């Protein structure tokens, strides 16, 4: 719950528009469609892959008997809470403190973008991580921020964050799941330009 308090206090104290934290309804649905482009393959591809190779689905014990509760927790208390704090509150407050912008893969960013990504990454390294995660976590941190700026909404990074957590929690990181991860990322990035064009339209 502490993740929700700073954004709420920021909105009350500074009287900012909720759009400053990526919560505007104007861009929410178009951003959500972009987010689903990542979340759906990440959740479904491990299942499809394991069915194709005739393996049973190795649900982790944390999920057994509590699938709906786990999905709710991952969406609200992980995806929404973390993105609201980092890409909503931190980025929303820091963005106005820096005036120098540069172009980064089609978007205009300033130091707030990189500070937010660095904070997110560092806080996720407070526990032991695999060598792969030392590359993976900074990558998705930047991608969360890029989607936030590109779609002008938190919806896309929230759904991507949700998809990543569900993927790992439900399916673990077995060989089949890893193959499915690669296929899911390929599909998402292949259709991303079309999805972004549709969002802008």
Image: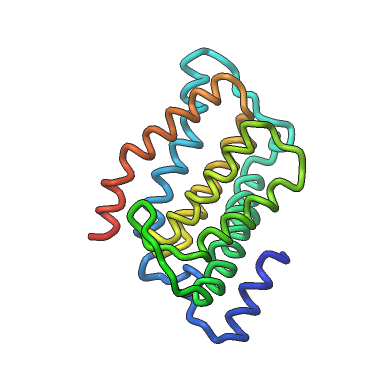
Q: Is residue 5 left or right of residue 167?
A: right
The correct choice, above or below, for 6 with respect to 137 in the image is below
- Please tell me which residue lies in front, 5 or 112: 112
**Of all residues shown, which one is farthest toward the right?**
127
Q: Is residue 123 left or right of residue 91?
A: right
- Please tell me which residue lies in front, 169 or 126: 126
Inspect this view and state whether residue 145 appears. Answer: yes
Image quarter for residue 188? Answer: top left
- Please tell me which residue lies in front, 126 or 192: 126
The correct choice, above or below, for 119 with respect to 143 in the image is below
Identify the residue at image location x=52%, y=43%.
Answer: 139
Q: Position of residue 88 (x, y in %)?
A: 54, 67
Q: Position of residue 113 (x, y in %)?
A: 51, 61
Q: Quadrant of the N terminus?
A: bottom right
Image quarter for residue 57? Answer: top right
Q: Quadrant of the C terminus?
A: bottom left
Total residue callouts: 0
Inspect this view and state whether residue 151 appears. Answer: no
The correct choice, above or below, for 175 with respect to 108 in the image is above
State the colouring used for the structure image: rainbow
Identify the residue at image location x=57%, y=64%.
Answer: 84
**Of all residues shown, which one is farthest toward the left?**
201
- Please tell me which residue lies in front, 117 or 30: 117
Q: Position of residue 28 (x, y in %)?
A: 40, 63
**Of all residues shown, which one is farthest toward the top?**
54
């Amino acid at each position: 719950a502490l993740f929700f308090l700073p954004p709420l206090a920021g909105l009350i104290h500074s009287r900012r528009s909720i759009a400053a934290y990526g919560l505007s309804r104007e861009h929410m649905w178009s951003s959500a469609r972009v987010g689903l482009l990542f979340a759906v393959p990440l959740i479904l591809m491990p299942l499809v892959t394991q069915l194709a190779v005739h393996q049973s689905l190795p649900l982790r014990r944390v999920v057994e008997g509590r699938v709906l509760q786990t999905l709710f927790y991952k969406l609200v208390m992980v995806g929404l809470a973390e993105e609201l704090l980092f890409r909503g509150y931190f980025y929303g407050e820091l963005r106005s403190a820096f005036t120098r912008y540069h172009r980064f893969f089609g978007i205009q960013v300033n130091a707030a973008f990189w500070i937010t990504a660095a904070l997110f990454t560092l806080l996720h390294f407070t526990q032991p991580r695999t060598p792969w995660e030392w590359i993976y976590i900074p990558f998705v941190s930047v991608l969360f921020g890029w989607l936030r700026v590109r779609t002008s909404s938190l919806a896309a990074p929230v759904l991507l964050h949700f998809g990543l957590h569900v993927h790992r929690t439900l399916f673990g990181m077995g060989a089949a799941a890893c193959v499915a991860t690669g296929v899911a990322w390929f599909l998402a990035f292949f259709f991303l330009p079309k999805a972004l064009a549709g969002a802008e339209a």
